[in-house]
Amino acid sequence: MAVILVASMQALGHIDQLLNVAEGLVTRGDRVTVLTSSRHADRIRAVGATPAALPPEAEFDEADLDAEFPGRSKTSGVRRLNFDFVNTVLGPMPHQTAALTALMQSTRYDAILADAGFFGIVPFLLGDPAARPPVLSYSTTPLMVSSCDHAPTGLGMLPSATTLGRVRNRALNVLSQRVLLRASQRAANQHLRGLNSPALPVFVSDAGVLADRYIAPTVPMFDYPRSDLPANVRFVGAVHPRLTVGFRRPGWWSALSGDKPVVHVTQSAIDNADLGRLVEPTIEAFADEDAIVVATTGGRPVDQMKIPLPANTFVAEHIPYEILLPHVDVMVTNGNYCAVQRALSAGVPLVMGGDTEDKPEVAARVEWTGAGVNLRTGTPSVGQIRRAVLAVLGDARYLHRARELESAYARRDGVAEIAALVDEVIAERARLTPQADHANLGRADTKSPPS
């Protein structure tokens, strides 16, 4: 039995995936503690793990980031990515580090599985490896490592490994790191100085390469090929949230079993404050089409819809994907990474309309695979959405590529492969660490941040 610490940001898109991994580790007999927001304590206990709460200072209301962080609503694209990284990812870092320090001083952990957005782990990665357990970093977004074969994260550009493409990539990487996302790098190093830690030896978005293993919870087919892929990166297949228990199908459910194509539209559970960005235009686009539209609000009350609902449209706050997706012909989404992989795992082609957080990168990967249409905007018009959906429905190549990805995902078991990686790093450390030092794993050394 191994003693594992899982550390996650509070957002559902992060904790949902890691709770599924935690449950798999518990099921095989490991003792698992999950460090995240206190509001997830009951869900952590439900998978058999022990909750550990982050201090309130590390938390924020991810359902209304514009109100939580003044000035955010005036940003978009790379500026939004930079703004969110500084405030939501790096802002909680000192408090996360303090919580990790307290746990590691009281318990000897055999390994730590850390959300790649949980930057509180970074000071430990920059310290003496012998003074900490092995760390596996888990990416909840498309892999953000820099490469000579693609443009930097945030631009949503397709990769190119040609001679001219690599010249472009190098120039854009320099621009991104030294200008566009410079504030993120400076903020990270400022926090590290305050924690008595060395500065980052890599760009801030590449911090996952400092871990013993960097987990990409997807299939290689859904990510760009890189000739310079870091040696510690492991593709494991998708990690989906736990299956829903007790869901009651609404009265209109039988309408999904007819001959009409079913179009599902969602703005996920975060970027959904304004349903007029994607959900409402999609409903309007198919009000007079011979199709069924199923919209989910990501938890927002259905009565927040500002348009009348046509007879062919059904709306719910949430519908479990394992129940809905087998009925869907095309999914229209702003690009939540987990939701997109759920769709592709079910062989459902996509229409992408998002421009916040990591969504342009997710959309670019869908476009690159040929499994959908990238609208390249977060506020597409009714006409743009209609044309894109009809193009996907009318061209079998999109469905074919989605089905190929479905097969690729089906061949992998993300949770099982992560469990194997946990065993791998524990065994690796046991071989390399003298017994006397091994007994002290998890205790902060003199360079570690204070509790």
Image (cartoon, rainbow, N blue to C red):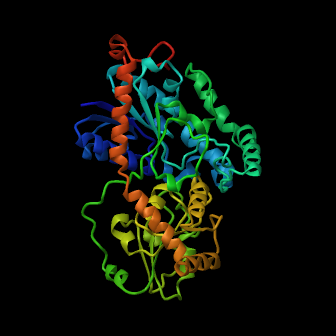
Residue at the location (56% across, 18% down)? 196
Residue at the location (36% across, 32% down)? 424
Looking at this view, is 349 or 178 the one in front? Answer: 349
Looking at this view, is 5 or 221 the one in front? Answer: 221
Q: In this view, does 84 lie above or below 99?
A: below
Q: In which quarter of the image is the C terminus?
A: top left
List x then y, in percent, for residue 403: 45, 68
State the image quarter where residue 421 is shown. top left
State the image quarter where residue 345 is shown. bottom left
Looking at this view, is 234 or 272 the one in front? Answer: 234
Residue 300 visible in the shown view: no
List x then y, in percent, for residue 194: 58, 22
Question: Count the marks: how many?
Answer: 0
96 relative position to 334: left or right: left
Q: Is residue 369 above or below residue 425?
A: below
List x then y, in percent, for residue 386: 59, 79
Residue 310 visible in the shown view: yes
Give the residue at the far top of this rendering.
436
428 relative position to 230: left or right: left
Q: Quadrant of the N terminus?
A: top left
List x then y, in percent, for residue 254: 32, 82
Residue at the location (48% across, 35% down)? 57
Residue at the location (41% across, 53% down)? 238
430 relative position to 138: left or right: left
